Amino acid sequence: MEVENLTTTVTEFVLLGLTQSPELKYLLFLVFFLVYLMTWLSNLTTIIVVVTNSHLHIPLYFFLANLAFADISDSSITAVKLLWDLASHTRTISFNWCIIQIFFFHFSEGAGILLLVVMAVDRYVAIHKPLHYLTVMNQEVCTGLVIGSWMGGFTHSIVQTALIIQLPFCGPNILDNFYCDVPQVIKLACANTDLVELLMVSNSGLLLSCIYLILLISYSIILVKIRKNITDGQHKALSTCAAQITVMSLIFIPGIFIYDRPFKKLLGDKIVSVTYSLITPMLNPIIYTLRNAEMKNAIWRLMSRILLCRRK
């Protein structure tokens, strides 16, 4: 049957979620509510600390604050719907909201991934050009890199969304997931999707793999070059590199598992989706904070000021 002879008749999708057990749903609601709360608290703390501390107004923390905002956005897109479904026992999402969820999820994820690339460039300049660091990574350059990251995420997402919208959906309408995403939705199209799947894998999976490989090679070169005669400034940059590699792996490895293959269902898909969309946004700021003395000191100073204000 030709695609042009088919029209979309599906008005909503049914999300099977993480479990069908009523008792387990309440437990999962509590767990993911705490995860979502921690995501907001940790990332919002990062943003507030960077904004309110003048000594953190340097490129690294500017990028980190933007990554924290992307993590809040990314988590909210999936967690709010998941928590609502677990609490209300509803399992449906309208076709339009499903498409909107896909768009904003890939928008924030794409921007976050490109911000990691920008942060790798920042560390390269900090280690190899320490005397010219603030000249090279000036305010205009940093602002342009951040805007470019968000525009890149927008472009990536609009391509994903456009490829899905042009497909006809006439049933079935059951998604074996807790949020709308490309691999599950594309399989419900009542048309041959081989070419679209190939384009999707290229736009998401292959791109993730290439970026991850490039970043690993870049960080390996950085680590090899500074393994001897490390100065204090380079030691701090090295510590930051370790945190960035950890965060990078938490984002890229699950993403590659989901998108860098033909869209077939595997047993670990839901677990990886939970890690990719809910757990990683919570862990990112925690990893950076634990690895960064300046951030920890700034947070303690902020907490001290809050406590002093309450006492007054």
Image: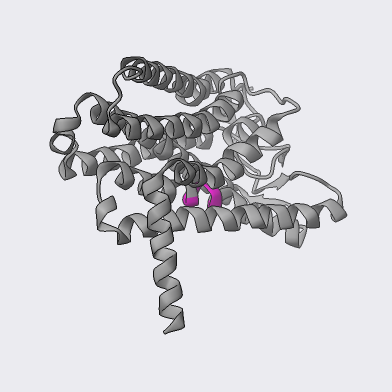
Up-down: is 25 above or below 140? Answer: below
Q: Quadrant of the N terminus?
A: top right
**Magenta span dominant secondary structure:** helix
Residue at (30% x, 30% y) in the render = 123
Residue 61's spot in the image, x, y percent?
Answer: 32, 46
Residue at (80% x, 45% y) in the render = 19
**Snapshot quadrant of residue 182:** top right
Residue 261's spot in the image, x, y percent?
Answer: 60, 19
In the image: residue 273, left or right of residue 163: right
How many marks on residues?
A: 0
As drawn, the residue found furthest toward the bottom would be 312
**Snapshot quadrant of residue 85:** bottom right
Magenta residue check for 123? no
Residue 100's spot in the image, x, y percent?
Answer: 51, 48
Q: Nearer the viewer, residue 102 or 165?
A: 102
In the image: residue 261, left or right of residue 165: right
Q: Nearer the viewer, residue 222 or 167?
A: 222
**Snapshot quadrant of residue 233:** top left
Up-down: is 156 above or below 31? Answer: above
Residue range of the region highlighted in magenta in the rendering: 72-76
In the image: residue 266, left or right of residue 127: right
Say if residue 11 shows up in the picture: yes
Looking at the image, what colour scheme do you see?
Answer: one colour
Q: Quadrant of the C terminus?
A: bottom left
Residue 304's spot in the image, x, y percent?
Answer: 42, 68
Say if residue 159 shows up in the picture: no
Residue at (44% x, 17% y) in the render = 213
